[in-house]
Amino acid sequence: MAKDLTDLKPVIDQMHTLLMNIEQLQERYQTLRDIVIEQLGDEGEGVIDGQTVATYKTFTARKFSTSWLKDTMPDVYEAGRREQTTTRFQLVTETRNA
């Protein structure tokens, strides 16, 4: 049995609106970010009036390949796995037909 949230409809509606705004803001931010990165070119640091306002750097990371371990030593991979319990809240954006 699902909990009736009818009293929270204004809250849910506001959350939907905020999510749409967040998406639009993220897209706009990405566009502006790309413009700044293009202007930085190979410099990696940009200044306005002598103050650093943006940096763009490439990093290399070495990470352990769990897929390699799983493929080459499945027993060790399974022995090293641990169960973890988490929670996840999801705002349903589409009406489901029952």
Image: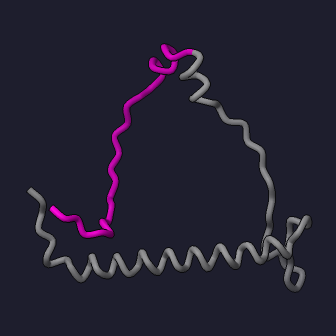
Q: Is residue 14 left or right of residue 35?
A: left
Q: Which of the 4 image quadrants contains residue 28?
A: bottom right
Kindly give the residue lying farthest to the bottom in the view shown.
Answer: 49
Residue drawn at x 25%, y 69% as measured from the top left: 95
| Quarter of the rendering occupied by the N terminus | bottom left
44 shown above or below 83: below
Residue drawn at x 58%, y 22% as measured from the top left: 69
Residues drawn in magenta? 73-98
Residue drawn at x 38%, y 81% as measured from the top left: 17
21 shown above or below 60: below
Q: Is residue 64 left or right of residue 36?
A: left
Magenta run includes residue 69: no
- The spot of residue 76 in percent (x, y) is 51, 15
Magenta run includes residue 95: yes
Q: Is residue 23 left or right of residue 38?
A: left
| Quarter of the rendering occupied by the C terminus | bottom left
- The spot of residue 11 in percent (x, y) is 26, 79
- The spot of residue 56 in percent (x, y) is 80, 64
